[in-house]
Image (spheres, rainbow, N blue to C red):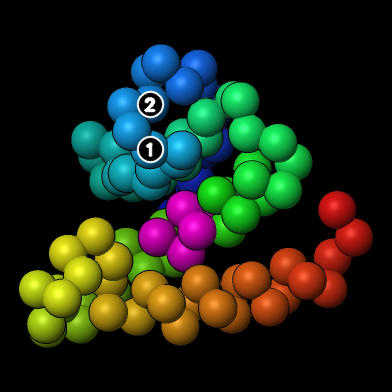
Amino acid sequence: MFPVRVYMRHPNRMGECMGYFSLDDSEERGVIVLANNLDESGLIDCFLEEWAHARTAYLADEADRDDDPHHHPSFWAEYGRIVKASREVAW
């Protein structure tokens, strides 16, 4: 896994999304950006989804992304694992 930075931005700078993940230009670290107007529950949910994107960013199983071009084929399994683990944490 690579280092990931997390930023909060005003929703006017976010377009239509509440959050996103991207790799920086050198692809040696990831960036998660979250809208700063989310309530605690929304912020946690959005962060968990973007963290799942970060965790699946380098996986090679690119087959059949036509059905869901924004999510890696292993994304939903990783997202489910992360959500399940987060339920054991007192936020």
Which residue is depicted at the point 61% across and 72% down? 82
Q: Horizontally, is 54 left or right of 90 in the view?
A: left
Report the magenta residues as a range: 49-53
Query: From this viewpoint, which residue is outermost toward the right?
Result: 90
Task: Give whichever of 67, 85 is nearer the camera.
Answer: 67
Report the residue marked by disc 1: 17
- Whether tag 1 and tag 2 are in contact, CB under 8 A, the answer is yes
Q: Residues within 10 Å of mark 2 (few under 14, many from 20)?
A: some
Q: Position of residue 65 (x, y in %)?
A: 14, 74
Q: Residues within 10 Å of mark 1 (few under 14, many from 20)?
A: few
Q: Position of residue 86 (x, y in %)?
A: 73, 68
SS for callout 1: loop
Asked if residue 51 is among those painted magenta in the image, a careful observer would answer yes
Q: Position of residue 57 (x, y in %)?
A: 32, 62
Label 1 and label 2: CA atoms lie apart by 6 Å
Task: Give whichever of 85, 39 is nearer the camera.
Answer: 39
Which residue is depicted at the point 86% across and 53% down? 91
The kind of residue tagged 1 is Cys
Magenta segment's dominant SS is helix
Report the residue marked by disc 2: 14
Task: Give whichever of 77, 25 is nearer the camera.
Answer: 77
